[in-house]
Image (cartoon, rainbow, N blue to C red):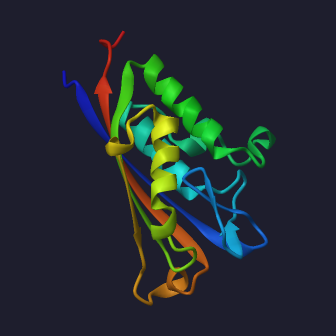
C-alpha cells in the first residue's frame, strides 16, 4: 500500500458584476466575482476536490451539495477545512498543492503571495509547499472575455496512519 496519493481538482465559475472576487480565500479588487451557491471560490473548490480525491472521499458536490440550503453563501474556507478534516480522519494529510488559475478577469500575479499564504494556512502547509500560477486563455471563448474563471489543482497527500 502506497503512503502517497495524488488528487486532481477542477472548477469553473462565471464572473458576475457586483459579486466579491474571492479566490484562494483572498478578496481581489475587481468589478466581477465568481458566482455560485457558496461564495464561489473556484480555487478552494478545486483544491477541496483534489484533497478528497486523493483521500478516496466523495467530491465537493456530494459532500456540500448546491441544492442544500445549509451551504447557501457558505465560506469555501470552511468547506476546505472540513474536507482536510475528513481526509485526516481517513489517515491522510496534504503534502503539497499546485494550482493554475485561468481567467481574463482579475490578474492573479499581484495577489499570488497572498493566495499562497492563505492556502498554506488552510492546508496546514508551509508556503513553500504551495504553488499558484495565473494564466490567460489567449482570446479563447467566454473565459477570454473576462466572464469566467477556471482552476486546476493537484494535491499530494501523505498517509499519516494505516487505513482502518
- Would you say 29 lies left or right of 84 here? right
Residue 118 seen in render: yes
Of the 4 image quadrants, the one containing the C terminus is top left
> Height in image: 55 above or below 74?
above
- Answer with left or right where residue 25 lies relative to residue 120: right
- In the picture, measured across the screen, residue 159 lies left or right of residue 37, that is left
Residue 12 in the image: x percent, y percent? 54, 64
For image coordinates 19% across by 21% down, the residue present is: 1
145 left or right of 19? left
Instruction: Pick out the residue farthest to the top.
Output: 164
Above/below status of 28 relative to 49: below
Q: Residue at x 40, y 39 (%)?
A: 53
Q: Position of residue 32 (x, y in %)?
A: 69, 74
Exactly how many numbered labels are in the figure?
0
Nearer-the-camera pick, 59 or 115: 115
- Specify the farthest residue to the left: 1
Front-most of residues 87 and 19: 19
Image coordinates for residue 124, horizontal then vertical, percent: 45, 31
**On screen, residue 9 above or below 150:** above
Vertically, is 163 above or below 100?
A: above
Which image quadrant is residue 138 in? Answer: bottom left
For residue 155, say whether it is visible. Answer: no
Tell me which residue sits at (48%, 46%) in the image. Answer: 117
Quarter of the rendering containing residue 87: top left
Query: What residue appears at the point 73 percent right and 44 percent down from the top-left corner?
Result: 74
Amino acid at each position: 500500500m502506497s503512503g502517497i496519493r495524488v488528487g486532481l481538482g477542477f472548477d469553473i465559475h462565471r464572473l458576475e458584476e457586483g459579486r466579491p472576487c474571492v479566490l484562494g480565500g483572498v478578496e481581489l479588487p475587481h468589478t466581477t466575482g465568481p458566482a455560485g451557491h457558496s461564495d464561489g471560490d473556484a480555487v478552494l473548490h478545486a483544491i477541496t476536490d483534489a484533497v478528497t480525491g486523493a483521500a478516496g472521499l466523495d467530491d465537493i458536490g456530494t459532500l456540500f451539495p448546491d441544492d442544500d440550503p445549509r451551504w447557501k453563501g457558505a465560506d469555501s474556507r470552511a468547506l476546505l477545512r472540513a474536507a482536510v478534516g475528513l481526509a485526516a480522519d481517513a489517515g491522510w494529510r496534504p503534502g503539497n498543492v499546485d494550482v493554475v488559475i485561468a481567467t481574463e478577469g482579475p490578474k492573479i500575479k499581484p495577489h499570488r503571495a497572498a493566495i499562497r499564504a492563505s492556502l498554506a494556512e488552510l492546508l496546514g502547509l508551509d508556503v513553500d509547499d504551495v504553488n499558484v500560477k495565473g494564466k490567460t486563455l489567449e482570446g479563447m471563448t467566454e473565459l477570454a472575455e473576462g466572464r469566467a474563471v477556471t482552476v486546476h489543482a493537484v494535491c499530494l497527500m501523505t498517509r499519516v496512519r494505516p487505513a482502518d
